[in-house]
Amino acid sequence: MSAILETDGLTKRFGALTAVDGVRFSVRAGERVALIGPNGAGKSTLFELLGGGLTADAGQIRFDGQDVTRWTPMRRAGAGIQRTFQIAAVFRSMTARENVQTALLAAGGKAKPMGRAADALIDEADALLAKLGIPADATRPVSELPYGDVKRLELAMALAGKPSLLLLDEPTAGMAAAERRAIMEQVCAVAEAGRISLLFTEHDMDTVFGFAERVLVLHEGRIIADGPPADVRGDANVRAVYLGADADA
């Protein structure tokens, strides 16, 4: 299976601090990959590099065979890279439907979520909301939605861009265990149906080892492990720097 995302020697420095240090990895088409590591490991910086929010000091990012290292976030989104954030990036004064309509318009190159163009997208917006399990809340302001539905809405907005790669930054943060499992099951089902690759960061290890097909471990800006979940869980170095000596093997 070919790689949809590849990094080679990816490096980002902030003064004397090297936050991402020569990172090299790949994500195959349709694959689910988790990125884990202790606080300060460089995960957020790496995600910003992949999404285009930061520019690399060295190295290369290739997406679907193209060098996208210097591309803007908008250009990457248009090419098929969509992302979500630790704090959901949604318009809280708008309804859930209007948020998705806005994302659909943006994906089509239109800036304003008003008028006939938006009205024509109601069915498509509602279909995306239904896919994520929140159709009944389409006309409610986002400020009234439960936290889990806000995270689902952000995912629906990302899907509006018809991605082939989704970058999910702590998609289950702040959720109870049952809700974490429910949203990840939805995410994985949608990704599998659309042949969408997933790269996600996560601190909850049940989520990581329950849903990832491969796990990358970042420590002090470097990848120290890359492999199947069982192998990574049993890796002595990973246990020492992150999982802990008492982690289940």
Image (spheres, grey):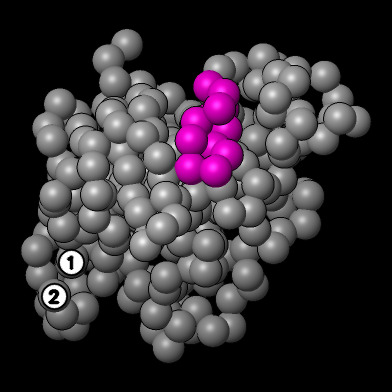
Residue at figure coordinates x 57%, y 65% from the top left: 149
**Residue highlighted by disc 1:** 105
Q: In x, y percent, where is residue 40? A: 58, 54
Residues under numbered marks 2 and 1 in contact, where contact means CB atoms less than 8 Å apart:
yes
Principal secondary structure, stretch drawn in magenta = strand
Q: Tag 1's secondary structure?
A: helix
- Residue 172 appears anywhere in the view: no
Against 136, is 236 above or below? Answer: above
Residue 74 picture location, percent across and down: 17, 59
**Residue at the limit of the structure toward the top, as seen here:** 1
Query: In the drawing, does residue 167 fall left or right of residue 82?
Result: right
Q: What residue type is labelled 1?
A: Leu
Residue name at image x 32 percent, y 43 percent = 11
Residue, x 32% and y 11% (percent of image)?
1
Q: Residue 16: in sight, yes or no?
A: yes
Return the residue at label 2: 111
At horizontal 49% and vertical 68% (from top left) the residue drawn is 88
Q: Position of residue 237 (x, y in %)?
A: 70, 24
Mark 1 packing: few (<14 Cα in 10 Å), some, or many (20+)?
Answer: many
Instruction: Give the residues drawn in magenta, as a range.
Output: 215-226
